[in-house]
Amino acid sequence: MSAPAPSVIDLVTQHMTRVLYFDLSRYLIAAGALTLLLLVFRGFAENRKIQRGRRPTRADYTRELLSSMRTVGVYAVVTLAILAGRQSGLILLTIRDAALWTIIWQFALMVIAHDAWFYWAHRAMHHKRLFRATHLHHHKSRTPTPWTAYSFTMTEAVIEVAFVPVFLLVTSQLGIAYAGYAILFFIWHQMIRNVMAHAGSELFPAGWVDNPWTSWIATTTHHDLHHSSGHNFGFYFTFWDRWMGTEHPRYRETFREVTTRSRAPEAVAEPAE
Ligand SMILES: [Zn+2]
Ligand SMILES: [Zn+2]
């Protein structure tokens, strides 16, 4: 006789701390690591600043960090709901034993689907009837920092994270058991691209937007322009903005300008005695 399945309450109490730690640590690790890199390579970061003459204030950092804690809380609740969905059989998940190829195609499918979700949810939140209640808070960060990545209202956090359970419910209905590693890579890829998009300094190499093999992957300038002057609603890719005519008219020029600047003399060497 098999043991009875644990109740949802058992599941929540068993996993709550671990889930909260998982959701909090990836934000702190990704935003912290990028902040450290920008400090270590300060010369590069200063030279590649996208919004010259504007700086995030201490109040910006405080607001971003505090509201990100609320986002972590929302994400943890949704992660627990996904675990409960798996236990009830509504969501099909295989934690181990997935072939590498399965992990790769499932990861790619999830990223492509999330890019579409993000684009359309983001455009909807920019509608004048929704903007104030959902997305204005994220745009208080006019000059983004890696810590802007999770700076959402509670409503926006729910909209952002809802993609994962909705996607898994749909794939489960289609009989696809999602591999745990595919979801893990998706989550980390999302986090890393999110902090990169808010770095404030362009991280992608010069020529990126002019190479047909890379120009479809969105750069830091792409999302930074969204914060400073609108347009560019996409996240990972540039497809949707191109198809829908919402790409910033000076996106490519701005990227080229930022990535081909010569270093200011004072940033290169100390003046001779
Ligand atoms: Zn926006
Ligand atoms: Zn943003």
Image (cartoon, grey):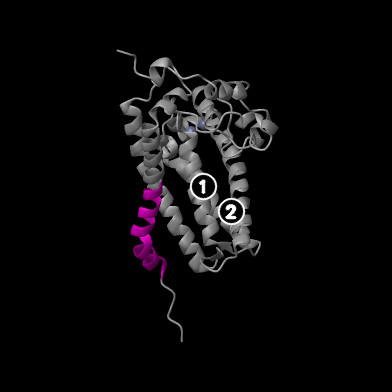
Residue at the spot 53% in from the left edge and 56% down from the top edge: 183
Decide whether residue 12 is among the magenta residues. yes
Q: Residue furthest front?
A: 273
Residue 23, image x and y in percent?
A: 40, 51
By secondary structure, the bulk of the magenta-drawn segment is best described as: helix
Badge 1: few (under 14), some or many (20 or more) residues near its Cα, within 10 Å? some
Q: Which residues are magenta?
A: 7-26
Q: Nearer the viewer, residue 52 or 3?
A: 52
Residue 140, image x and y in percent?
A: 42, 27
Disc 2 is placed on an element classified as helix
Q: Amino acid at mark 1?
A: His
- The circle drawn on residue 118 is none
Q: Is residue 6 above or below residue 151?
A: below
The reply to whether the C-beta atoms of the residues labelled 2 and 1 are less than 8 Å apart is yes
Q: What residue would you read off at disc 2?
A: 107
Nearest to N terminus: mark 2 or mark 1: 2
Residue at the spot 45% in from the left edge and 56% down from the top edge: 79
Q: Nearer the viewer, residue 39 or 23?
A: 39
Residue 272: which quarter of the image?
top left
Q: What residue would you read off at disc 1?
A: 189
Q: Is residue 18 left or right of residue 93?
A: left
Q: Quadrant of the C terminus?
A: top left
Q: Is residue 145 visible?
A: yes
Q: Is residue 222 above or below residue 97?
A: above
Q: Residue furthest top?
A: 273
User: Marks 2 and 1, Cα distance to the nearest angstrom?
Assistant: 10 Å
Residue at the spot 59% in from the left edge and 61% down from the top edge: 100
Decide whether residue 158 is among the magenta residues. no
Disc 1 is placed on an element classified as helix
Q: Residue furthest bottom?
A: 1
